[in-house]
Amino acid sequence: MVAIVMKDEETKAIVSHVVPHKGDFQWVATQLNRDLLKWGMRGKITMKSDQEPALIDLLNGIARKRTEIIPDSVTLIEHSPSHDPQANGMAERAVQSLESMVRTLKLGIEARIGARIPVRHSTFSWMVEHAADLLTKYVVGGDGRTPYERLKGRAYRGELYEFGQPVLRRGNGKVSGGVMKARWAPSIWLGKRFASDEHIVCLEDGTIRSESSRDPTHARYEVELGVHR
């Protein structure tokens, strides 16, 4: 699996996405532009990577898309020296932190369900994004603040569950089917949306956005994620 990791030098916030295949910078550039916007970066920024051709294409793609979205934006591009992976140390440390968090999440859910989750399982992409979200919301720096606090000006106080935990999900909008229709549906918890703080859950027919979730005390983990009994 190929993943991209981006870290903000000022706030230390991290985002990560599993990409369809290496070199697919169009899709990744769109995702990372959304991340830059949710971080509030609309003016002049400097982006740095190593000199791998795929990353050079990616940064150029991000710069073009930023100009399309924000015409007066400026994107400066820098590259670390060739054959020196440590030159971009901040990015290297971000990758190491993300790998550690993903490994912790993966081993944790595997221990709970008693089975292995292959990295090509559809939930793995959500696991990578959730790992970056946890690092942004909870890693305390030398100034006593988390990256989330530096971005938002306040500590994160939202409700989180364990990745892969069975939860009950209440859908958005008005419930159809009459007043006796069930308001909550069983689902699997996959994380939160950064901008809206909505829960991301998985039903049998795919992944959806939810406005509310709760932990049913009778729930138990299943080997097949997305199935709840």
Image: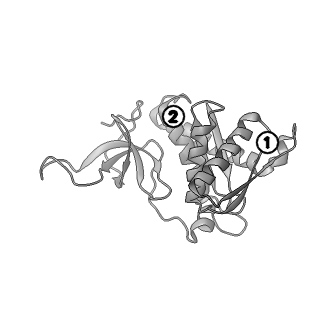
Q: In which quadrant will I find the N terminus?
A: top right
Tell me where residue 158 appears, x and y as whole percent.
46, 62
Q: Amino acid at mark 1?
A: Asp
Q: Amino acid at mark 2?
A: Glu
Measuring 50% from the left and 38% from the top, which residue is drawn there?
109
Within-10-Å neighbours for mark 2: few <14, some 14–19, many 20+: some
> Which of the labelled discs sits on residue 50, or is there none?
1
Tell me where residue 183 appears, x and y as whole percent.
22, 51
Measuring 68% from the left and 41% from the top, which residue is drawn there?
58
Say if residue 228 shows up in the picture.
yes
Q: Are marks 2 and 1 in contact (CB under 8 Å)?
A: no
Asked if residue 178 lies left or right of residue 159, the reply is left
- In the displayed orientation, state which residue is furthest to the bottom: 153
Which of discs 2 and 1 lies nearer the camera? The answer is 1
- Decide: is 5 above or below 160: above
> Which of the labelled discs sits on residue 27, or is there none?
none
Mark 2, secondary structure of its residue: helix
Residue 46 quadrant: bottom right
Within-10-Å neighbours for mark 1: few <14, some 14–19, many 20+: many
Which residue matches tag 2?
110
